[in-house]
Amino acid sequence: MIAGDLSGADIKNFMATVKLPFDHQEGAMKYHDVHSDRYAITLKALSKINLPNEAKVLELAASPYGMSAYLCTLFGEDLTLATYSETKTERNIGICVDETSFILREYGFNVEQDIWPFDANSFDLVIACEIVEHLAMDPMALFAGANRVLKPGGHFFVSTPNAASIQNFLKLGRLMPAGLAQQFRRPLSIARLYERHSREYSPFTIGEMCSAAGFEIDLMETDSAFPVFDLGFSQDDIDQIIRIVGVPELRRDTVNVVGRKIGPVVQRYPNTHELYSAEDE
């Protein structure tokens, strides 16, 4: 059972017991320290999914393996990892948690361009944390790929920065660019393209993508992984903005959506929410 009551401090304490499959741990551990609150809210959302015993789980974009370390203590060898690679790869990686070693199978491929290297109807849960915002060409490939490899009734979990967060409203109010990590990378390559956020999504847009891909929405929520920077607005100003734009429960910085597979992909290239151009049909 996935614990839903962990705090960011709990995650930091847990990560202190972990050895990751890197020659140098420091860079990855700094990343995990910054994102510990997000890991905690991800686990809180995942805990709301009713999984069968011995569930088969696929974690996409697993590296640098912070979530993987916690998940492998729950699912063991039933956890499969995937990471970005320009050519298809397959290997075993080792993660050590409190002196217990876990050997996990990891597959490298491009979720937008490749056929995922798994049989249809293989998994009970597919986890896609902070990946969809990086996809630059065909984000629905992520949702369609998840549908293919999930068993009927299986669950697809997506977390992503919230384009409709109150933080982004405040940024726009100061004529600043909304969103995160949108800097262009040099030198240009596909791998470096995927480092930046190509597009961020609102909760409703992620919901539309799930529905188009044959999922029924079981959970749509937002949570706060980071503090709101007021950018010079008073708290009264911020409260008034929230009252004006409405739906305060969906204005936090991180979107969590769970879709349950109810059928095949309905619309591979939806043009709602300005996702795909109808002119390309």
Image (spheres, rainbow, N blue to C red):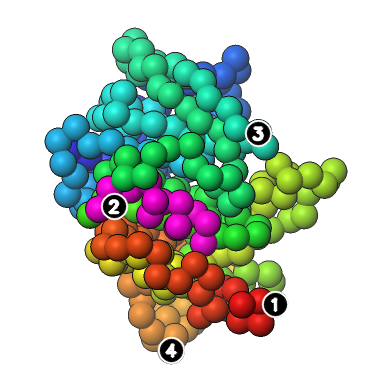
Label located before the other in sequence (4 or 3): 3
Three-letter amino acid code at the position of disc 3: Thr
Find disc 3 in the rendering and name its residue: 87
Label 3 or label 2, whichever lies nearer to me, is: 3
Q: Secondary structure at mark 2?
A: strand
Looking at the image, residue 197 sits to the left or right of residue 169; the answer is right
Three-letter amino acid code at the position of disc 1: Leu
Residue 87 or residue 39, whichever sits in front? 87
Find disc 2 in the rendering and name its residue: 155
Q: Give the quarter of the image for residue 54.
A: top left
Three-letter amino acid code at the position of disc 4: Ile
Taking the magenta stretch, the answer to whether it contains residue 147 is yes
Label 4 or label 3, whichever lies nearer to me, is: 3
Find disc 4 in the rendering and name its residue: 244
Q: Which residues are magenta?
A: 140-152
Pointers 4 and 1 in contact (CB under 8 A)?
Answer: no
What residue do we see at 38% from left, 84% from top? Answer: 246
Find disc 1 in the rendering and name its residue: 175
Q: Secondary structure at mark 4?
A: helix
Label 3 or label 1, whichever lies nearer to me, is: 3
Locate the C terminus and report the quarter of the image it occupies. Answer: bottom right
Label 1 or label 2, whichever lies nearer to me, is: 2
Residue 159 seen in the current view: no
Please determine whether, in this image, residue 162 is positioned above or below residue 15: below
Label 2 or label 4, whichever lies nearer to me, is: 2
